[in-house]
Amino acid sequence: MTKKQPLFGLCSCCNPAIARLAQTFLSRRQFMLLGAGAFAAYQHFEEDRKGSVEVGKLADFAILSDNPLTVDPMAIKDITVLATIKEGKTIYKA
């Protein structure tokens, strides 16, 4: 089994060599967050109940050690998850 590192993958969205297409329509960071939210929910056929902030949708979220919208793009991979909230309950706490 391997340790998943989703923030490392999200970091690649901000890498200029990889994210040129995303630049056309969205900022790189907007694209990165869509990858973690709306796109992920769509991949799992759950976009009707999660993936965006809307009334009636689940409010699952993670608390991060830094803000991925403001840190240096190459530092996104170093952000750690401090806690994960799912269906109103803390399911992970560092």
Image: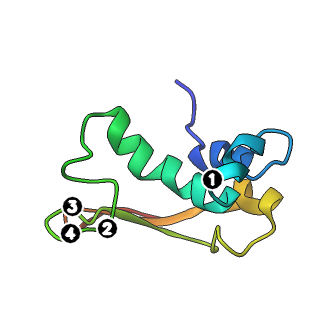
Q: Is residue 29 left or right of residue 91?
A: right
Question: Which numbered dot is residue 33?
Answer: none
The residue at the point 63 percent across, 74 percent down is 67
Q: Which residue type carries mark 2?
A: Val
Which residue does the numbered mark 2 point to in the structure image?
A: 53
Q: Which residue is mark 1?
A: 25
- Residue at (81, 68) in percent of width and height: 72
Residue 17 position (above or below residue 36): above
Mark 1–mark 2 distance (CA, rounded to whole Å):
21 Å
Disc 3 designates what residue? Answer: 58
Q: Is residue 93 left or right of residue 53?
A: right
- Mark 3 Cα shell of 10 Å, populated few (<14), some (14-19), many (≥20): some
Position in image of residue 51 (x %, y %): 34, 54
Q: Earlier in the sequence, mark 1 or mark 4?
A: 1
As helix, strand or loop, the secondary structure at mark 1 comes to helix
Which residue is painted at 64% across and 74% down in the image? 66
Q: Which mark is residue 88?
A: 4
**Contact? badges 3 and 2 (CB < 8 Å):** no
The residue lying toward the viewer, choosing from 23 and 90, is 23
